[in-house]
Image: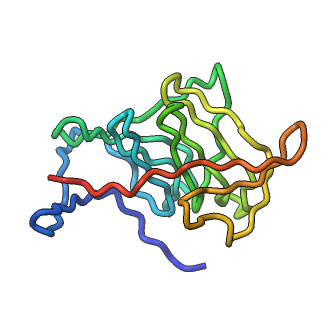
Amino acid sequence: MGHFTSLNCMYCFNTQTFEWTQLSYSPSDTVPSPRNSHSCIYSKHCESLIIFGGANENIGPMNDIWFFCLEDKQHQWRKMIPNIDKGDIPLPREMHASCIDDARRCMYVMGGRNAEGNVCQDLWELNLGRLVSSPFAETFHFSPNSLFNDRNLLRIHQKLMNGIELIQLHLQDVLILLT
């Protein structure tokens, strides 16, 4: 396996000047630990970037969830603490995929690789309003060619209690941050 560098720095791209600026934090700020192989999505409802999981050289795979609020210019991270009394939480993982359904206020985390190096064949639904997560599908099968199509859909073949179904989750457009 190759070596990955874990970082926790964040850059902002100005679409008017076409310049990158590194965001700075004070020593008292709480920020995510350095990581690689994580997922990052944008929620219009929360007006936040949301990162899940990833890994670094010291901790290995992680399953933490962080919000970066874009509503204000304070550039602060906030860690989401799931309500584990009302649900489970995905196992730590890296190299997974995520997407969001803002209408339902749910983030979906699919696949990845766990601490033992095994491929995770599960799909999780994280309710961002109630801070509850639950397994959406215990196993799924997909073909790489059907993952993204010209209609910008994520196709997931999953096995549910009542049989095999095809789920299509609409992906959000790519967000370019403005300064």
Vertical placement of residue 92 versus 88, above or below: below
- The x and y percentages for residue 92 are 61, 48
Whether 170 is drawn above or below 116: the answer is above
Q: Residue at x 19, y 47 (%)?
A: 25
Give the left or right position of residue 71, taking residue 153 as reference.
left
**Who is closer to the viewer here, 145 or 135?**
145
Closer to the camera in the image, 149 or 65: 149
Residue farthest front in this picture: 151
Q: Nearer the viewer, residue 55 or 70?
A: 70
* Figure colour scheme: rainbow
- In the rendered image, residue 59, in percent from the top left (x then y), is placed at 53, 54
Mark count: 0
Q: Position of residue 159 (x, y in %)?
A: 84, 47
Give the position of the N terminus as an image quadrant: bottom right
Q: In this image, 58 relative to 68: left or right?
A: right
Q: Image check: 19 left or right of 10?
A: left
Residue beneath the point at 90% across and 37% down: 162
Q: In the rendering, at what x and y percent does residue 27 appear?
A: 20, 44
Specify the quadrant of the image occupied by residue 11: bottom left
Residue furthest toward the bottom? 2
Name which residue lies at 86% across and 48% down: 164
Identify the image quadrant of residue 126.
top right
Please, which residue is most extreme toward the top here? 85
Going 60% across and 48% down the picture, which residue do you hit? Answer: 169
